[in-house]
Image (cartoon, helix red, strand yellow):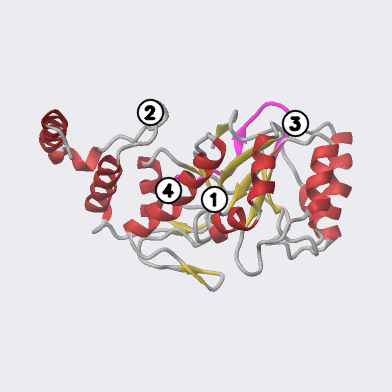
Amino acid sequence: MISVKQTGLILIFFLLIGCQSHQADSLPPLDESNVKRPVPSFLVDHRKEQLITKYENKIPTEFGENVSGVYTHFRSSKKEIALTFDACGGSHGNDVDETLISFLKENKLPSTLFINSRWIDQNTALFQELARDPLFQIENHGTHHKPLSVNGQSAWGISGTASVKEVIEEMKENQNKIEELTGKKPTLFRSGTAYYDDVAVQIAQDLGVQIVNYTILGDAGATYNVQQVYDALLQAQPGDIALLHMNQPTSGTAEGVEKAIPALQKNGYTFVHLHSQHLQ
């Protein structure tokens, strides 16, 4: 039963937000970093409703991988690049490239892992092991591995999220899962297919999420052979972000990475996480 005091606090909260309702078009990003867990559900629901109201009638003008507001590289004056690996999940994406992971560990290669909710469900113990290893930065690869769109636009035969509500859920549900399992909230996001529309990108920004794609297509969805992976990585320039996969052990990714890393190191390159970089 809600006490009189609790009822009063709730009423005061809604009076305050009601006074600000006319500013819906300039909502600041929700900063949950200093909010004691769990965030009350009525706060979360209200935030979602605010965003739906703000964006539900906005029509996208861009759709693709390089939409305005999507980060593809980072500023650096050094010869350093970021290795990022997606784990996509689903019926054809729940596997683990153990050879690749072992190579990254043995060679102490900092890597950023974008992990999908379905992969986490199938590999929970390994996910938690990776999350405990400071070599790996864990980030968000979505809940259902869909292109991020407010009107269902498709990419590579995969239908995108079809509403503002679905855009929010595609990001937030997996973000919440990762935080519950690791104690750390991911703030970077890469969608399934790495496609977005510009309205979805704006929603992400309002949620305090940075959308990160790539400058180096490292394995083309784990379809490249060993030589193609090697050739792609050897094109690296300072500040590049390489996109590869860690969930397809029969692909050429692991062997291509194993071949490319010594060559890159010989050329003076080092490898960094994304969380400490100035993304652009």
Q: Is residue 11 above or below residue 125?
A: above
- Look at the image and give the residue range highlighted in magenta: 68-82
Secondary structure mostly seen in magenta is loop
Q: Nearer the viewer, residue 237 or 149?
A: 149
How far is the residue under mark 1 from the one under mark 4?
12 Å
**Among the two numbered marks 1 and 4 on one chain, the one whose residue lies closer to the N terminus:** 4
Q: Residue 230, can we see it?
A: no
Name the quadrant containing residue 25. Answer: top left
Residue carrying label 3: 79
How far is the residue under mark 4 from the one under mark 3?
34 Å
The image's mark for residue 190 is 1
Residue carrying label 4: 172
Q: Quadrant of the N terminus?
A: top left
**Among the two numbered marks 2 and 1 on one chain, the one whose residue lies closer to the N terminus:** 2
Disc 1 versus disc 3: nearer the observer = 1
How far is the residue under mark 3 from the one under mark 2?
40 Å
Query: For the residue carrying disc 2, how many other residues have a C-alpha within 10 Å: few (<14), some (14-19), or many (20+)?
Result: few
- The amino acid on which the numbered mark 4 sits, given as a three-letter code, is Lys
Say which residue appears at 17% left-offset and 31% top-offset. 6
Q: Determine whether, in the image, residue 251 is placed left or right of residue 239.
A: right
Disc 2 versus disc 1: nearer the observer = 2
How many numbered discs sit on the rendered protein? 4
- The amino acid on which the numbered mark 2 sits, given as a three-letter code, is Lys
Q: Which percent across, then down, holds residue 245?
A: 70, 55
Residue carrying label 2: 36
Q: Secondary structure at mark 2?
A: loop
Q: Residue 74, can we see it?
A: yes
- The amino acid on which the numbered mark 1 sits, given as a three-letter code, is Arg
Q: Which percent across, then down, holds residue 163?
A: 33, 62
